Amino acid sequence: MNKITLYILIIIAAGVVFSSCEELDDPLDGLQETDLFVQFGANTPDTVSASEGGSLIITIQAPISFNENLIASVTFSGTAVFGTDFTITANNVISGNTGESVAPIQSVDANGATILVPFLPTRGEDLITDQVNFTVNFLTDEATDGQKILEITLNGATGTVTADLTLAGGRGPIRNNTYIRISDVD
Protein backbone atom coordinates (compact mmCIF):
# COMPACT_ATOMS: atom_id res chain seq x y z
CA MET A 1 0.00 0.00 0.00
CA ASN A 2 2.83 2.38 0.80
CA LYS A 3 4.32 1.94 -2.67
CA ILE A 4 0.99 2.56 -4.39
CA THR A 5 0.36 5.68 -2.32
CA LEU A 6 3.88 6.93 -3.08
CA TYR A 7 3.37 6.35 -6.83
CA ILE A 8 0.04 8.16 -6.77
CA LEU A 9 1.60 11.11 -4.94
CA ILE A 10 4.46 11.25 -7.48
CA ILE A 11 1.99 11.18 -10.37
CA ILE A 12 -0.12 13.95 -8.80
CA ALA A 13 2.99 16.06 -8.09
CA ALA A 14 4.22 15.60 -11.66
CA GLY A 15 0.80 16.57 -12.97
CA VAL A 16 0.80 19.74 -10.85
CA VAL A 17 4.32 20.67 -12.00
CA PHE A 18 3.55 20.11 -15.69
CA SER A 19 0.19 21.85 -15.56
CA SER A 20 1.68 24.91 -13.83
CA CYS A 21 4.28 25.41 -16.59
CA GLU A 22 3.24 28.16 -18.91
CA GLU A 23 4.15 28.29 -22.53
CA LEU A 24 6.82 30.95 -23.11
CA ASP A 25 7.02 33.01 -26.26
CA ASP A 26 10.13 32.70 -28.40
CA PRO A 27 12.20 35.84 -27.59
CA LEU A 28 13.47 35.96 -31.18
CA ASP A 29 10.01 35.64 -32.72
CA GLY A 30 9.31 38.59 -35.00
CA LEU A 31 12.87 39.89 -35.09
CA GLN A 32 14.45 40.34 -38.49
CA GLU A 33 17.30 37.95 -39.17
CA THR A 34 20.69 39.63 -39.45
CA ASP A 35 22.95 38.84 -42.35
CA LEU A 36 26.61 38.15 -41.82
CA PHE A 37 28.36 41.50 -41.59
CA VAL A 38 31.51 43.52 -41.08
CA GLN A 39 31.30 46.76 -39.13
CA PHE A 40 33.21 49.85 -38.12
CA GLY A 41 34.72 49.35 -34.67
CA ALA A 42 33.29 50.98 -31.57
CA ASN A 43 36.22 53.45 -31.70
CA THR A 44 34.84 54.90 -34.96
CA PRO A 45 32.39 57.72 -34.21
CA ASP A 46 29.22 58.21 -36.25
CA THR A 47 29.94 61.94 -36.51
CA VAL A 48 33.26 63.69 -35.93
CA SER A 49 34.75 67.15 -36.34
CA ALA A 50 38.33 67.30 -37.61
CA SER A 51 40.74 69.93 -38.90
CA GLU A 52 43.10 70.08 -41.84
CA GLY A 53 46.40 68.57 -40.72
CA GLY A 54 44.69 66.06 -38.42
CA SER A 55 43.81 62.41 -38.80
CA LEU A 56 41.25 59.81 -37.73
CA ILE A 57 41.82 56.08 -37.20
CA ILE A 58 38.97 53.86 -38.38
CA THR A 59 38.67 50.16 -37.57
CA ILE A 60 36.91 47.60 -39.76
CA GLN A 61 36.13 44.35 -37.98
CA ALA A 62 34.41 41.05 -38.54
CA PRO A 63 32.68 40.15 -35.23
CA ILE A 64 33.07 36.48 -36.08
CA SER A 65 35.98 34.94 -37.94
CA PHE A 66 35.47 33.25 -41.27
CA ASN A 67 38.96 31.68 -41.22
CA GLU A 68 40.01 33.60 -44.31
CA ASN A 69 40.98 37.11 -45.33
CA LEU A 70 38.14 39.46 -46.29
CA ILE A 71 38.12 42.34 -48.77
CA ALA A 72 36.01 45.21 -47.40
CA SER A 73 34.63 47.95 -49.61
CA VAL A 74 34.22 51.58 -48.49
CA THR A 75 32.95 54.54 -50.48
CA PHE A 76 33.66 58.25 -50.07
CA SER A 77 31.09 60.98 -50.60
CA GLY A 78 30.63 64.61 -49.66
CA THR A 79 32.44 67.81 -50.60
CA ALA A 80 35.93 66.70 -49.50
CA VAL A 81 38.15 65.75 -52.45
CA PHE A 82 40.39 62.67 -52.27
CA GLY A 83 44.04 63.66 -52.76
CA THR A 84 43.30 67.35 -52.04
CA ASP A 85 41.39 67.32 -48.75
CA PHE A 86 42.10 63.78 -47.52
CA THR A 87 43.95 60.52 -48.17
CA ILE A 88 43.91 57.16 -46.43
CA THR A 89 46.87 55.08 -45.28
CA ALA A 90 47.36 51.85 -43.33
CA ASN A 91 50.29 49.98 -41.83
CA ASN A 92 51.05 46.51 -43.12
CA VAL A 93 49.32 43.63 -41.32
CA ILE A 94 50.09 39.92 -40.97
CA SER A 95 47.76 37.64 -42.89
CA GLY A 96 46.65 34.60 -40.88
CA ASN A 97 46.32 32.61 -44.10
CA THR A 98 49.89 33.12 -45.24
CA GLY A 99 51.72 34.56 -42.23
CA GLU A 100 53.09 37.24 -44.55
CA SER A 101 53.13 40.98 -44.09
CA VAL A 102 50.60 42.50 -46.48
CA ALA A 103 49.40 46.01 -47.31
CA PRO A 104 45.74 46.21 -46.29
CA ILE A 105 44.73 48.93 -48.76
CA GLN A 106 44.18 46.98 -51.96
CA SER A 107 42.95 49.91 -54.05
CA VAL A 108 41.90 53.50 -53.43
CA ASP A 109 40.61 56.38 -55.55
CA ALA A 110 38.22 59.32 -55.30
CA ASN A 111 35.19 57.02 -55.02
CA GLY A 112 36.41 54.65 -52.32
CA ALA A 113 38.75 51.87 -51.35
CA THR A 114 39.03 48.12 -50.93
CA ILE A 115 40.75 47.14 -47.72
CA LEU A 116 42.02 43.71 -46.63
CA VAL A 117 40.68 42.54 -43.27
CA PRO A 118 43.18 39.82 -42.36
CA PHE A 119 42.21 36.52 -40.80
CA LEU A 120 43.84 36.47 -37.36
CA PRO A 121 43.82 33.12 -35.55
CA THR A 122 42.54 33.65 -32.00
CA ARG A 123 43.71 32.39 -28.66
CA GLY A 124 40.19 31.68 -27.37
CA GLU A 125 39.91 34.71 -25.10
CA ASP A 126 39.74 37.23 -27.96
CA LEU A 127 36.30 38.76 -28.47
CA ILE A 128 36.93 40.38 -31.85
CA THR A 129 39.19 38.51 -34.18
CA ASP A 130 39.59 39.76 -37.70
CA GLN A 131 40.10 43.51 -37.91
CA VAL A 132 42.22 46.21 -39.52
CA ASN A 133 42.83 49.92 -38.91
CA PHE A 134 43.22 52.55 -41.56
CA THR A 135 43.93 56.24 -41.10
CA VAL A 136 42.13 59.11 -42.78
CA ASN A 137 44.61 61.98 -43.12
CA PHE A 138 43.13 65.47 -43.52
CA LEU A 139 45.42 67.46 -45.79
CA THR A 140 46.29 71.12 -45.47
CA ASP A 141 45.48 72.33 -48.96
CA GLU A 142 46.89 75.90 -48.67
CA ALA A 143 43.54 77.33 -49.81
CA THR A 144 40.87 79.15 -47.85
CA ASP A 145 37.98 77.05 -49.08
CA GLY A 146 35.79 76.56 -45.99
CA GLN A 147 34.55 73.47 -44.21
CA LYS A 148 34.46 70.20 -46.16
CA ILE A 149 32.33 67.14 -45.52
CA LEU A 150 33.56 63.57 -45.89
CA GLU A 151 31.22 60.62 -45.48
CA ILE A 152 32.76 57.15 -45.38
CA THR A 153 30.37 54.23 -45.85
CA LEU A 154 31.27 50.58 -45.23
CA ASN A 155 29.45 48.67 -47.98
CA GLY A 156 30.39 45.14 -46.97
CA ALA A 157 33.04 42.52 -47.64
CA THR A 158 33.73 39.34 -49.57
CA GLY A 159 35.90 36.35 -48.80
CA THR A 160 39.22 35.92 -50.58
CA VAL A 161 38.96 32.12 -50.66
CA THR A 162 35.25 31.29 -50.52
CA ALA A 163 33.71 32.84 -53.64
CA ASP A 164 30.16 33.08 -52.29
CA LEU A 165 31.09 34.53 -48.88
CA THR A 166 29.53 38.00 -48.82
CA LEU A 167 28.99 40.14 -45.76
CA ALA A 168 26.77 43.17 -45.30
CA GLY A 169 28.23 46.51 -44.24
CA GLY A 170 27.29 47.26 -40.65
CA ARG A 171 24.83 45.70 -38.25
CA GLY A 172 21.79 46.84 -40.17
CA PRO A 173 21.90 50.64 -40.05
CA ILE A 174 24.61 50.90 -37.36
CA ARG A 175 28.41 50.91 -37.52
CA ASN A 176 28.56 51.30 -41.27
CA ASN A 177 28.91 55.04 -41.73
CA THR A 178 30.95 57.95 -40.37
CA TYR A 179 30.28 61.59 -41.15
CA ILE A 180 33.30 63.94 -40.85
CA ARG A 181 33.29 67.74 -40.82
CA ILE A 182 36.77 68.98 -41.82
CA SER A 183 37.51 72.54 -40.68
CA ASP A 184 39.63 74.80 -42.89
CA VAL A 185 42.75 76.07 -41.10
CA ASP A 186 44.22 78.12 -43.97
Image: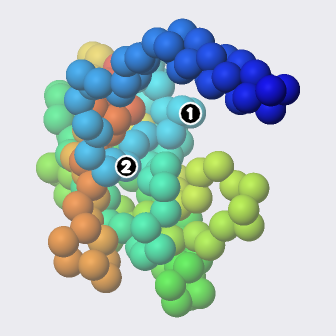
Label 2 Cα neighbours within 10 Å, binned few <14 / some 14-19 / many ≥20: many
Q: Which mark is residue 186?
A: none
- Specify few, some or many for label 1: CA neighbours under 10 Å numbering under 14, 14-19, or 20 or more: few
Q: Residue at x 71, y 19 (%)?
A: 9
| Residue pictured at 34% horizontal, 35% vertical | 171
Where in the figure is residue 159, as x and y percent of width and height?
A: 30, 71
Local SS, label 1: loop
Q: From this view, report whether residue 69 is shown above or below residue 138.
A: below
- Colouring method of the image: rainbow
Q: Who comes first in sequence, dot 2 or dot 1?
A: 2
Q: Is 73 left or right of 9, judged from the image as shown? A: left
- Whether residue 135 is visible to the viewer of this picture, yes or no, is no
| 74 relative to 60 in the view: left or right | left
Q: Position of residue 89 (x, y in %)?
A: 45, 57
Relative to 154, residue 25 above or below? above
In this rendering, the answer to whether 19 lies above or below 123 is: above
Residue 38 tag number:
2
Location of residue 184 in the rendering, given as x and y in whole percent from the top left corner: 37, 21
- Left or right for 18, reference 40: right
Identity of the residue furthest to the front in this view: 1
* Residue underneath mark 1: 43
Q: What secondary structure is marked by label 2?
A: strand
Q: Residue type at mark 1?
A: Asn
Q: Which residue is drawn at 41% across and 73% down?
A: 69
